[in-house]
Image (tube, coloured by chain):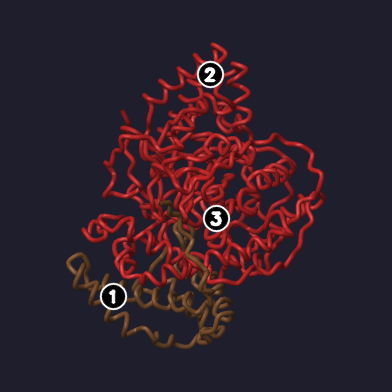
């Protein structure tokens, strides 16, 4: 029995971060009288639940209340699931009382991007033509999190059709533009805009987002949260809206790298309902001393044309881990038509996936003006061009694998700028800024995992972010890197104003 | 991810940048270089990656017409015939530009040399 709701933001901090470009917001978990649990990481929430210091019902009610009262501020929530969530929370408490634990996520509330199917609850795909759509099954990721004891509290907002029709403005969802809790005049990123804002604002302890090419990393950066794009095939896509079958991935958006590992362990693995899913089990490892230094590559050009604060914070981030990482600079990134390949593949697969919407003309019901015509040209993409792009993925993978023979991960700013303003077309936001080598398209074309971690603040009090990208199935290394970085800095603990 | 708009598409922006470094050389390795430059300025950024800012083109010469302009207009007639009832004139103009941009991107992809044995990456099980 779904109920409508809204959303809003949060805040909390630790210490020890190197000085930043601009003054970060104040922090403190108990700021302004909000409950101490609001911004705690999953590891701590799990400990408290298992120690019976807090109940799942209390935690779930806290999350639901914040989603309802603060959610609308950030356009972060589509559907609140109070009844089913509270029922599940009470059951989780009974289990814990009886000594039955389903693991570290037992009793912890979470939200999912509204392209993930939930039985009997609306799944809108962020788009007006589908706002009343209801599936009669749960996505595999929802089933797995239920099995892990997590409590689904809300369907979270997103860019319509995950951006599949070519949005060029933040206001591209029937729920309005996703707003970052750090500054209400700016975007929370897309297309997982709701998960980004909701985690950042302390509305949910974690969320599940999706990425075709950048949709987890970008909102993680713009919202100041830690996000993990898993290796393609690591997490079943069954029940998630298909935009691009060969690129779509689901992954966690959390407060810490460790939290991402905990969630990934719960949702990863082979699923007979998704032919692309793989057997590889991901087992989350607790922090342990590392024998060898991390070998990091910094591709040439990643900071040349980014915003000054992005560059400065990236340099400080590398300095923070200098004693545990050998950093090689100016590494040549393999040269391929990364952007064009993604463009053609997403265009062709997306046009096929939404052919009925395009041909019926119902795309005119979409919010963003460019989305209303964006699919028509894609219906005529030549099959040869699509196949050419798909054939390129083999050589692309081999070239990148060769690079990773010498490195554990590639480090770069996640985005070249802070969040875009919500009142301008994207291309008018930051003239002259460029992110350098197209690492996001490249990583997605090759199916590689990446972890985005907050690493400071830039213009207008907005967060900046650093990304680690590794070879396929290297999530454990990336999370280890993220954990190491976050053990030395406190950016991931900062909390937005008025939350 | 932006296809185009009547005010100037990201694909065009990308192609403009590519042209600045010698796009016309349709041979494999230079094209790959150019394509990478293209991706930097984000021809059609993917879903999670909004189109980057416009480059500073102040003082730049007027953009020459695309070699695909006639093809794009022809293909736009197909779109108009099939879907014209759903599109107004301004949208059709934008679609025409999308088609032009798509053909230019296709040219970049086709310019990369592949071996006969380079198969497309697809998942299919009998």
- Above or below residue A105? Residue A366 is below
**Disc 3: which chain?**
A
Q: Residues within 10 Å of mark 3 (few under 14, many from 20)?
A: many
Q: Nearer the viewer, mark 2 or mark 3?
A: 3
Using residue A147 as the reference point, say whether residue A312 is left or right of it.
right
Residue lying farthest to the left in this orientation: B85
Give the drawing colour for chain B.
brown
Q: Is residue A424 visible?
A: yes
Residues under numbered marks 2 and 1 in contact, where contact means CB atoms less than 8 Å apart: no
Of the numbered discs in the image, which one, if any, rests on residue B93?
A: 1
Residue lying farthest to the front in this orientation: B126
Measured as percent of width and height from the top left, residue A147 is found at 49, 27
**Disc 1: which chain?**
B
Using residue A63 as the reference point, say whether residue A101 is left or right of it.
right
Residues under numbered marks 2 and 3 in contact, where contact means CB atoms less than 8 Å apart: no
Of the numbered discs in the image, which one, if any, rests on residue A55?
A: 2
Q: Which residue is mark 3?
A: A447
| Label 1: which secondary element | helix
| Label 3: which secondary element | loop
| Label 2: which secondary element | loop
Measured as percent of width and height from the top left, residue A433 is found at 56, 68
Q: Are marks 2 and 1 on the same chain?
A: no
Q: Residue at x 68, y 57 (%)?
A: A314
- Above or below residue A161? Residue B105 is below
Q: Nearer the viewer, mark 3 or mark 1?
A: 3
Give the drawing colour for chain A.
red
Q: CA distance from mark 3 to mark 1?
A: 35 Å
Q: Quadrant of the N terminus of chain A?
A: top left
């Amino acid at each position: 029995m779904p109920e409508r709701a809204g959303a809003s933001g949060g805040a909390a901090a630790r210490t020890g971060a190197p000085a930043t470009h601009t003054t970060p917001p104040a922090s403190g978990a108990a700021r302004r009288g909000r409950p101490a649990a609001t911004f705690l990481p999953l590891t701590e929430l799990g400990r408290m639940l298992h120690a019976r210091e807090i109940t799942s019902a209390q935690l779930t009610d806290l999350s639901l209340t914040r989603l309802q009262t603060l959610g609308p501020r950030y356009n972060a929530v589509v559907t609140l699931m109070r009844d089913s969530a509270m029922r599940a929370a009470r059951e989780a408490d009974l289990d814990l009382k009886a000594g039955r634990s389903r693991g570290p996520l037992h009793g912890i509330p979470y939200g999912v991007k509204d392209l993930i199917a939930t039985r009997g609850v609306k799944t809108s795909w962020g788009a007006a033509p589908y706002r009343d759509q209801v599936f009669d099954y749960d996505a595999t990721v929802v089933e797995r999190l239920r099995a892990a004891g997590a409590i689904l509290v809300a369907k979270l907002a997103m860019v319509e059709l995950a951006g599949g029709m070519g949005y060029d403005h933040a206001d591209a969802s029937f729920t309005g533009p996703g707003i970052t809790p750090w500054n209400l005049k700016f975007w929370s990123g897309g297309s997982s805009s709701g998960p980004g804002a909701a985690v950042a604002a302390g509305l949910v302890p974690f969320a599940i987002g999706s990425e075709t090419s950048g949709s987890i990393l970008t909102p993680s950066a713009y919202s100041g949260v830690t996000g993990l794009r898993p290796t393609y095939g690591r997490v079943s896509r069954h029940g998630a809206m298909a935009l691009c079958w060969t690129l779509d991935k689901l992954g966690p958006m959390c407060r810490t790298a460790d939290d991402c590992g905990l969630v990934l362990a719960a949702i990863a693995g082979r699923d007979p309902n998704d032919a692309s899913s793989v057997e590889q089990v991901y087992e989350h490892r607790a922090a342990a001393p590392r024998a060898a230094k991390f070998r990091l590559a910094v591709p040439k050009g990643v900071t040349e044309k980014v915003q000054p604060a992005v560059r400065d914070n990236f340099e400080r981030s590398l300095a923070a881990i200098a004693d545990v990482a050998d950093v090689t600079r100016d590494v040549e990134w393999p040269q391929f038509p990364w952007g064009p390949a993604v463009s053609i593949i997403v265009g062709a697969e997306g046009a096929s996936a939404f052919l009925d919407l395009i041909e019926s003309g119902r795309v005119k019901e979409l919010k963003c003006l460019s989305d209303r015509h964006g699919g028509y040209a894609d219906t005529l993409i030549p099959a040869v061009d699509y196949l050419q792009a798909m054939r390129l993925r083999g050589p692309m993978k081999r070239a990148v694998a060769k690079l990773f023979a010498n490195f554990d991960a590639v480090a770069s700013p996640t985005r070249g700028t802070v969040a875009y303003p919500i009142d301008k077309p994207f291309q008018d936001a930051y003239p002259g800024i460029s992110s350098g080598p197209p690492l996001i398209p490249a990583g997605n074309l090759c199916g590689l995992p990446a972890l985005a971690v907050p690493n400071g603040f830039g213009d207008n009090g907005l967060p900046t972010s650093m990304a680690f990208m590794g070879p396929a199935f290297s999530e454990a290394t990336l999370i280890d890197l993220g954990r190491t970085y976050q053990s030395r800095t406190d950016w991931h603990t900062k909390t937005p104003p008025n939350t | 991810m932006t296809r185009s708009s009547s005010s100037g598409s990201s694909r065009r922006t990308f192609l403009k940048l590519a042209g600045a470094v010698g796009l016309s050389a349709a041979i494999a390795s230079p094209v790959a270089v150019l394509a990478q430059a293209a991706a930097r300025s984000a021809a059609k950024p993917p879903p999670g990656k909004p189109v980057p800012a416009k480059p500073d083109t102040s003082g730049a010469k007027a953009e020459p017409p695309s070699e695909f302009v006639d093809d794009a207009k022809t293909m736009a007639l197909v779109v108009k015939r099939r879907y014209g009832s759903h599109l107004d004139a301004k949208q059709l103009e934008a679609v025409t530009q999308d088609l032009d941009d798509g053909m230019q991107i296709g040219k970049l992809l086709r310019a990369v040399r592949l071996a006969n044995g380079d198969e497309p990456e697809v998942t299919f099980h009998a």
